C-alpha cells in the first residue's frame, strides 16, 4: 500500500497551518522554518504555493546521500532520514528537485517529511484542501 | 502564579536610536492577558492628558497576541495601540496578515516605538538585532511600491513589513498602517502617528520558535477549535464569500448604510457583494491570515474597466463606505477605489465617510458642485461619480485642494466648512461610523456609543442580536434567558449582550485571535480560549477568569478616555442617527433616540459599575479589579465608591 501527499496550489490560502502543525508534531514547538512542508508566499499578490516531499519512486535524495542516511521503506515507499546517520553535508538539499528537504543548522541535520507514520497532520489541518492525503493500493 | 511566561518588550526610541528590553513576568503580564490588554496598560502608563498624538512622547505599541505563532485557528493577529490623532483618545487596532508572527519569531512579544527620527526611517527587527535604516528612497512611495522595494533591498527571505503610504506621511488623521501589503490597522489615524515619527516601515523576521507549555494539551484544544470552525455555518460562509458576503443580507435588513446614512438599503446590492465577486470572476484568489482556517480574505481584480487594478479585499466595510455609502454601485469602480485606499494607506471606512459627506455638502450647497482636483483637473461632487470618488481618495492621501480638509477626518472637516455640515458628518468622538445602520440594530447602537474608539464595530460587535446563526441564538439564550431577544430592533437585555461581546473581544485581541472566529461566528468560545491559554502558558485559566481580566482591560481603556476628560456625554452616536428617522420599508420607526440610548446606557453603566451620571468607573469597581493606580490617576478619592 502506498500513500502520497497531493498538493493543489490553486487552493492554498497561505495560512501556514500545515507548517505549524508539522513543526509542533516533530519539534514540539512552533518553528515553521523547520517544517517539512513549505509554503512559499508572495504577499504582494496573496499567492502561496505549498510544496512537500513526493516520496519519489527513484528518489534523487536517496542516491545523493553519501552515507546512506536516507532510506526508502520497502513496505510503504516512505523516504525518510535516519538522523543518527546524517552527517549534515546537505547533498540531499541540492538533489531534491522540489526543494523539500530542510536543514536544521542548530543540530546540523537534514530533515524531511516522513508522512507522520501514515497520519499526516499537515493534511489534517489544511483548511482549503491544498494538501490532501491519498492512499492507494496500486501505488498511484 | 508559576513563572512560565515572560513577555519580552522591545523599546525603541527613534530620537536617540536607543534600544532596550523589558521583561514582564507571568502574573503581571496575565493581569492584562499579555497582548492588547498589556499594550493598553503600557500606553496608559506612558501617556498623560497632555500627550500630543503627533508628539514624540506618544508611543506606538505593537502587541501580537499571546498565541500568535501557534496553530490555533486565527492566531495571527497583532494589536496596535496609541493615542489617536482622530479622537485624541484611546485607540487600538488589530491587523491580520503575517507581521505579528514575524515579530514573535524575531523574539519579541511587544514593540514600543517612541520619539521621532530625524530622517525617514526603516526599522528592521530581527533575532540578530534592531537596525535604523535610511528610508529616504521609500518616502513618497505608496504602500505597494515601498513594500516591494524594501523586500527587494533587504533580501531577507520571508520578511514581513508594516508600512505607511502617502496618507500617513502627510499626517492624515484617517491614515492606516498596512502590513503584508493588504492587512491594515485602519482606524483612528495610527498611520499618521507612524508618519509623525518619520517611520516609513517596520520589517520583522526571525527564527525564534514559539513554545507552548504543554504541546499535547495545546494540540488537543487547537483540534477542537479547528473542528468547531470547520463545522460552523457562518465560518463556511465567510470562507466562501468573505466579509463582502454580508452586503446582501445587510441590505435586505435595511442595515446597509447608504448615501451617507440617509438610507439603509439600495435597490440592488448584488454588484457590491461578495457573491458577485465570486460568481462574476472578480475574485482572483482566496487568502487567509496567519494560522486562519476561516479564509475570509480575498484578492480581487477589476474586469471591465481600470485594467491592471488588483488588490487585497474588498471587505464589507469598504464596500459599504465606498459603494452604497457613496452611491457607487459599479463593481469595477468600487474595486478601483478599494485598491487606491489600500496602496495610498487610507482607512477605507473613514475615506468613504468623508467623501459621502463632501457629496452631501455639495448637494446642500455648502460646498460648490465642482472643485479643482489640485493638478489642473475638475471633480464633480456628485453621488455615484466614480471619477470623483477615485480622485478624492488621491486628493485626501496627498492633501491636495479639498483633500487637505478631508484628510482631517469628517469632524474637523465640518468645523472648517461650517454651516449645518456637522449634522451630516457621521461621526462620534471624532471617528467616522463604520458600516452598520445602528438605527436598525440596538445592541450595535449601544456598543458603538460605549466604544472608546468611537462608533465602530471592532470593540464589541454584538452580531448575535441579529439571530443569524444557531450559535448566536444560543448565546442570546444563555445571556438573556430566551432566544426571542435575538432581535435587532428591541432594546431588552442589550446591555448584557454588549458587555459580553466587549469582554470576548478583549480576550480575542489579547490572545491574537480574530473576531471573525470568536464573535461574528461564535466558533471559538471563551471556554476554549481559557483552555488555550492554560495549555500554552502552563497556568490554569477559567472562563470566568478570562472575563475578569477582560473587564480589567475594558476599565483601563475606559479610564484612558476619562483621564482625557471624556464623560457620559461622549458615549453617543452621530447626530444623524440620533435625530433623523431612517426611511425603511419594514414599518419600523428606526432611530437611535436620546431616550432609548439613555436607558440602555443607564443599565449598561450599572452592569459595569460605572457612575450613572458621569460614566466614570467607580473607585470601588477599579479597586475590585486591582486597578488602584488608575483610581489615583482619575483623581477619585478613596471615599468615592
Ligand atoms: S506528512 Fe507529516 S512530516 Fe510530512 S510534511 Fe506533513 S506534517 Fe510534515
Ligand atoms: S495549510 Fe493548506 S492552505 Fe494553509 S498554507 Fe498549508 S497548504 Fe496552504
Ligand atoms: S477570519 Fe479573515 S480576517 Fe480573520 S484571521 Fe481569518 S482570514 Fe484573517
Image (tube, rainbow, N blue to C red):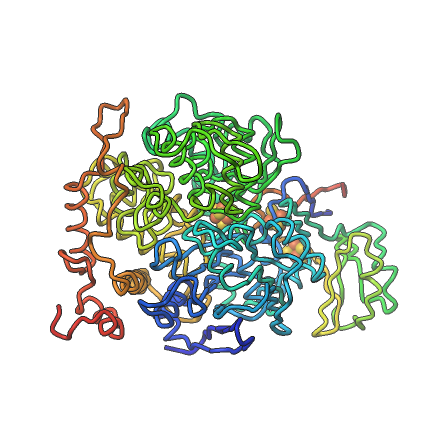
Q: Residue at x 53, y 31 (%)?
A: B378
Q: Nearer the viewer, residue B165 or B73?
A: B165
Q: Nearer the viewer, residue B555 or B452?
A: B452
The x, y position of residue B456, in whole percent, is: 35, 46
Q: Is residue B583 above or below residue B465?
A: above
Q: Is residue B3 above or below residue B486?
A: below
The x, y position of residue B399, in whole percent, is: 50, 47
Rendered image quadrant of residue B256? top left
The x, y position of residue B198, in whole percent, is: 54, 63
* Residue A107 appears left or right of B591: right
* Residue B208 appears left or right of B353: right
Q: Nearer the viewer, residue B171 or B156?
A: B171
Q: Residue at x 79, y 55 (%)?
A: A74
* Residue B566 appears left or right of B302: left
Q: Residue at x 46, y 46 (%)?
A: B404
* Quadrant of the drawing holding the N terminus of chain B: bottom left
The x, y position of residue B92, in whole percent, is: 40, 57
Instruction: Answer yes or no: is residue B556 visible.
Output: yes
Rendered image quadrant of residue B508? bottom left
Q: Is residue B141 above or below residue B67?
A: above
Instruction: Answer yes or no: is residue B257 visible.
Output: no
* Quadrant of the drawing holding the C terminus of chain B: bottom left
Amino acid at each position: 500500500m502506498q500513500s502520497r501527499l497531493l498538493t493543489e496550489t490553486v487552493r492554498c490560502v497561505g495560512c501556514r497551518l500545515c507548517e505549524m502543525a508539522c513543526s509542533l508534531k516533530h519539534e514540539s514547538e512552533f518553528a515553521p522554518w523547520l517544517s517539512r512542508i513549505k509554503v512559499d508566499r508572495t504577499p504582494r499578490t496573496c499567492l502561496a504555493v505549498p510544496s512537500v516531499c513526493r516520496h519519489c519512486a527513484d528518489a534523487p535524495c536517496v542516491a545523493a546521500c553519501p552515507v546512506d542516511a536516507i532510506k526508502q521503506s520497502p513496505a510503504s515507499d516512505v523516504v525518510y532520514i535516519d538522523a543518527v546517520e546524517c552527517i549534515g553535508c546537505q547533498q540531499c538539499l541540492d538533489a531534491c528537485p522540489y526543494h523539500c528537504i530542510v536543514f536544521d543548522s542548530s543540530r546540523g541535520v537534514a530533515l524531511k517529511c516522513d508522512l507522520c507514520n501514515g497520519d499526516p497532520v499537515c493534511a489534517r489541518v489544511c483548511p482549503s484542501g491544498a494538501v490532501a492525503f491519498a492512499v492507494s493500493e496500486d501505488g498511484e | 502564579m508559576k513563572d512560565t511566561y515572560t513577555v519580552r518588550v522591545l523599546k525603541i526610541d527613534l530620537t536617540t536610536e536607543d534600544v532596550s528590553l523589558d521583561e514582564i513576568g507571568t502574573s503581571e503580564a496575565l493581569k492584562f492577558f499579555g497582548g492588547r490588554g498589556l499594550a493598553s496598560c503600557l500606553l496608559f502608563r506612558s501617556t498623560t492628558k497632555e500627550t500630543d498624538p503627533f508628539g514624540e512622547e506618544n508611543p506606538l505599541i505593537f502587541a501580537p497576541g499571546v498565541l500568535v505563532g501557534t496553530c490555533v485557528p486565527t492566531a495571527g493577529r497583532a494589536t496596535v495601540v496609541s493615542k489617536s490623532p482622530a479622537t485624541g483618545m484611546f485607540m487600538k487596532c488589530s491587523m491580520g496578515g503575517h507581521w505579528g508572527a514575524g515579530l514573535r519569531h524575531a523574539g519579541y512579544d511587544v514593540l514600543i516605538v517612541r520619539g521621532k527620527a530625524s530622517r525617514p526611517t526603516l526599522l528592521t527587527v530581527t533575532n540578530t538585532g534592531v537596525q535604523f535604516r535610511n528610508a529616504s528612497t521609500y518616502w513618497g512611495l505608496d504602500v505597494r511600491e515601498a513594500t516591494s522595494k524594501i523586500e527587494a533591498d533587504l533580501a531577507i527571505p520571508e520578511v514581513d513589513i508594516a508600512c505607511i503610504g502617502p496618507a500617513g506621511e502627510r499626517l492624515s488623521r484617517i491614515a492606516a498602517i498596512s502590513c503584508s501589503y493588504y492587512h491594515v490597522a485602519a482606524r483612528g489615524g495610527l498611520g499618521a502617528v507612524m508618519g509623525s515619527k518619520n517611520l516609513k516601515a517596520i520589517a520583522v523576521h526571525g527564527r525564534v520558535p514559539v513554545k507552548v507549555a504543554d504541546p499535547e494539551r495545546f494540540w488537543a484544544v487547537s483540534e477542537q477549535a479547528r473542528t468547531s470552525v470547520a463545522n460552523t455555518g457562518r465560518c463556511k460562509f465567510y470562507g466562501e464569500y468573505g466579509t463582502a458576503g454580508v452586503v446582501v443580507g445587510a441590505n435586505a435588513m435595511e442595515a446597509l448604510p447608504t448615501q451617507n446614512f440617509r438610507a439603509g438599503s439600495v435597490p440592488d446590492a448584488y454588484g457590491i457583494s461578495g457573491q458577485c465577486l465570486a460568481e462574476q470572476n472578480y475574485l482572483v484568489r482566496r487568502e487567509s491570515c496567519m494560522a486562519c482556517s476561516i479564509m475570509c480574505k480575498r484578492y480581487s481584480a477589476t474586469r471591465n474597466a481600470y485594467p491592471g487594478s488588483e488588490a487585497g479585499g474588498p471587505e464589507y466595510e469598504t464596500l459599504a463606505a465606498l459603494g452604497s455609502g457613496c452611491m457607487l454601485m459599479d463593481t469595477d469602480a468600487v474595486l478601483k477605489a478599494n485598491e487606491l485606499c489600500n496602496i495610498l494607506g487610507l482607512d477605507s471606512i473613514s475615506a468613504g465617510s468623508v467623501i459621502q459627506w463632501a457629496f452631501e455638502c455639495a448637494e446642500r450647497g455648502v460646498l460648490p458642485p465642482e472643485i479643482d482636483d489640485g493638478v489642473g483637473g475638475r471633480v464633480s461632487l456628485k453621488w455615484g461619480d466614480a471619477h470623483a470618488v477615485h480622485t478624492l481618495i488621491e486628493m485626501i492621501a496627498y492633501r491636495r485642494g479639498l483633500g487637505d480638509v478631508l484628510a482631517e477626518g469628517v469632524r474637523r472637516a465640518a468645523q472648517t466648512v461650517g454651516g449645518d455640515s456637522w449634522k451630516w458628518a457621521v461621526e462620534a468622538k471624532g471617528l467616522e461610523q463604520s458600516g452598520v445602520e445602528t438605527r436598525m440594530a440596538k445592541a450595535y447602537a449601544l456598543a458603538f456609543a460605549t466604544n472608546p474608539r468611537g462608533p465602530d464595530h471592532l470593540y464589541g460587535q454584538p452580531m448575535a442580536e441579529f439571530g443569524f446563526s444557531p450559535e448566536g441564538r444560543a448565546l442570546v439564550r444563555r445571556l438573556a434567558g430566551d432566544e426571542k431577544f435575538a432581535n435587532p430592533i428591541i432594546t431588552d437585555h442589550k446591555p448584557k449582550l454588549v458587555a459580553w461581546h466587549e469582554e470576548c473581544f478583549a480576550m480575542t485581541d489579547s490572545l491574537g485571535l480574530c473576531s471573525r472566529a470568536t464573535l461574528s461566528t461564535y466558533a471559538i468560545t471563551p471556554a476554549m480560549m481559557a483552555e488555550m491559554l492554560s495549555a500554552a502558558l502552563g497556568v490554569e485559566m477559567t472562563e470566568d477568569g478570562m472575563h475578569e481580566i477582560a473587564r480589567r482591560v475594558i476599565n483601563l481603556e475606559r479610564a484612558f478616555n476619562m483621564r482625557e476628560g471624556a464623560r457620559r456625554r461622549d458615549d453617543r452616536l452621530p447626530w444623524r442617527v440620533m435625530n433623523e428617522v431612517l426611511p425603511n420599508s419594514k414599518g419600523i420607526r428606526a432611530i437611535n433616540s436620546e431616550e432609548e440610548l439613555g436607558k440602555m446606557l443607564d443599565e449598561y453603566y450599572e452592569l459595569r459599575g460605572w457612575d450613572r451620571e458621569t460614566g466614570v468607573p467607580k473607585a470601588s469597581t477599579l479597586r475590585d479589579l486591582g486597578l488602584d493606580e488608575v483610581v489615583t490617576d482619575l483623581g477619585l478619592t478613596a471615599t468615592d465608591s
